Image (spheres, rainbow, N blue to C red):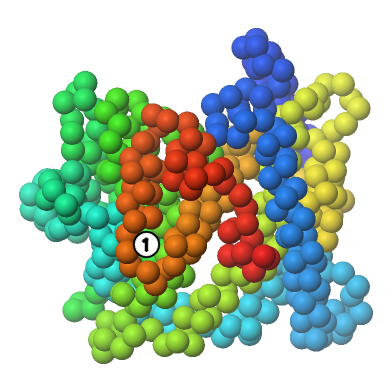
């Protein structure tokens, strides 16, 4: 944009003010200030992890882009036959067409196998298997804000003690409910406030039941439910008694997604999936062919996705780690080009690209010098699931043992212990990206 619509001066001002504020607080850069309250110890730690992942993801991304380009040349007509390279907007379009033809699977095919009551049964069964908790319906025992909202109580299986509760507001109500999905605290655990039973809100926006048919979910909605339930577990199963660090409170920004992303991994465990994926009318299990395609979709274009996320994370860090927009040596777009050449050389931004002018995560949201957190937490969640893989997903006793350990560390300690110590207590070492790369087909 130009003239009054050009927000580059505002971005430069934001970066300068953040640097000035950080200096006043005793930090050399805004990046250093941001990381002071996060799990990652330094800019170098984030960069090292990013480069380690990039060393595997870059070759994969190049191969994926080559396959998409070949597909476009074969199916795009004369315009594409002679193209040497696809433009960024072409990549997105042809990637989707290639995916549709490769997997030939639609949301409509999967819907009948993901009825909400069955999914909840499977999710609660998994929580029992892993963490030794029993979840029981307690509808009518607490006031709700809508007749569709459900209330559940959580019990410790061994002691029989009621340890937590949660509300589930599963359905979309466009007139008075915002979109998306989220978990929030209703009542937090606090010894000072004499609150021993935490209560969580779990909110989704699924399609409501129609007539006698139950709510049918897309696979993405099932994954979202597992994700938000992971956040809820950390809130509900905490043993920390100081309110400011109990449950999800006080957990470092780059570690808070660990339990939620961890729970998503179980959808790719066959025994978990087939515990609830059955046709709502016939009871027939999800066809093996469809399950196989879900597994294949997980790694489709994983290299392109990983490199894109690494690029955004390191672009954010570079802008907040000593870059001074006032000295005139470099512009924000020069920094963008440098990071693109390093992490997405296969798909660099076109001349005149102004993505940074709408990068609201870091200029209008809470992710400044913190966008890397998405990948940082994903590394931990994959590594945590890797502990179950190492133990043997078919070994029930080992799954229970590792699950209880996860409950006693990651889900229990909240923000009362530094996340590096929490993870090390669970895994016996600090996290590595090996499991993440393996799950993305790059081992």
| Occupied quadrant, residue 335 | top right
- Decide if residue 58 is on the left or right side of residue 291: right
Q: Residue 352 at x, y = what percent? A: 84, 48
Q: What is the crowding at mark 1: few (fewer than 14 residues within 10 Å), some, or many (at least 20)? A: some
- Decide if residue 74 is on the left or right side of residue 17: right
- Decide if residue 368 is on the left or right side of residue 12: left
At a point 20% along the width and 44% down the height, the residue shown is: 164
| Label 1 secondary element | helix
Q: Where does label 1 land, which residue?
A: 398
- Decide if residue 138 is on the left or right side of residue 131: left
At a point 92% along the width and 79% down the height, the residue shown is: 82
Q: Is residue 249 above or below residue 311?
A: above
Q: Residue 49 at x, y = what percent? A: 68, 45
Q: Residue 147 at x, y = what percent? A: 15, 56
Q: Residue furthest left?
A: 141
Q: Is residue 176 above or below residue 324?
A: below
Exactly how many numbered labels are in the figure? Answer: 1
Task: Decide which of 401, 7 is in the foreground and name it.
Answer: 401
- The answer to whether one can see residue 338 in this image is yes
At a point 53% along the width and 56% down the height, the residue shown is: 382
Quarter of the image with the C terminus is bottom right
- The answer to whether one can see residue 356 in this image is no
Quarter of the image with the N terminus is top right
Q: Is residue 364 above or below residue 206?
A: above
Q: Residue 93 at x, y = what percent? A: 69, 71
């Amino acid at each position: 944009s130009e003239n009054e619509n050009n927000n580059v001066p505002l971005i430069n001002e934001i970066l300068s003010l953040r640097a000035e504020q950080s200096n006043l607080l005793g930090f050399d850069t805004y990046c250093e200030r941001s990381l002071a309250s996060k799990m990652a110890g330094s800019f170098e730690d984030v960069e090292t992890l990013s480069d380690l992942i990039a060393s595997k993801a870059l070759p994969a991304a190049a191969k994926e882009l080559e396959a998409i380009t070949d597909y476009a040349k074969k199916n795009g007509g004369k315009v594409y036959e002679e193209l040497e390279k696809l433009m960024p907007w072409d990549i997105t379009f042809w990637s989707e067409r290639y995916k549709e033809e490769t997997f030939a699977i639609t949301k409509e095919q999967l819907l009948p196998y993901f009825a909400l009551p069955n999914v909840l049964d499977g999710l609660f069964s998994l929580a029992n298997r892993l963490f030794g908790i029993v979840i029981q319906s307690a509808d009518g025992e607490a006031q709700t804000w809508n007749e569709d909202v459900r209330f559940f109580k959580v019990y410790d299986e061994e002691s029989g003690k009621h340890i937590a509760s949660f509300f589930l507001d599963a359905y979309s109500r466009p007139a008075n409910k915002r979109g998306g999905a989220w978990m929030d605290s209703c009542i937090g655990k606090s010894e000072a406030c004499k609150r021993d039973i935490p209560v969580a809100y779990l909110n989704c926006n699924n399609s409501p039941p129609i007539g006698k048919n139950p709510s049918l979910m897309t696979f993405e909605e099932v994954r979202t439910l597992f994700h938000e339930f992971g956040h809820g577990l950390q809130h509900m199963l905490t043993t920390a008694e100081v309110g400011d660090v109990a449950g999800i409170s006080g957990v470092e920004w780059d570690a808070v997604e660990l339990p939620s992303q961890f729970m998503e991994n179980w959808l790719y465990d066959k025994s978990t999936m087939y515990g609830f994926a059955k046709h709502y009318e016939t009871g027939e299990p999800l066809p093996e062919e469809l399950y196989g395609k879900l597994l294949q979709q997980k790694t489709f274009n994983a290299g392109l996705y990983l490199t894109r996320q690494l690029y955004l994370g390191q672009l954010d860090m570079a802008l907040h780690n000593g870059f001074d927009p006032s000295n005139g040596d470099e512009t924000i777009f020069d920094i963008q080009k440098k990071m693109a050449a390093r992490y997405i050389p296969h798909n660099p931004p076109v001349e005149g690209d102004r993505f940074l002018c709408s990068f609201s995560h870091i200029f209008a949201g809470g992710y400044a010098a913190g966008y890397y957190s998405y990948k940082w937490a994903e590394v931990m969640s994959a590594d945590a699931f890797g502990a179950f893989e190492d133990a043997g997903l078919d070994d029930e006793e080992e799954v229970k043992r590792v699950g209880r350990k996860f409950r006693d560390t990651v889900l229990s300690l909240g923000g009362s212990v530094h996340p590096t110590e929490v993870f090390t207590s669970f895994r016996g070492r600090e996290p590595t990206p090996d499991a993440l790369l393996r799950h993305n087909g790059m081992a």
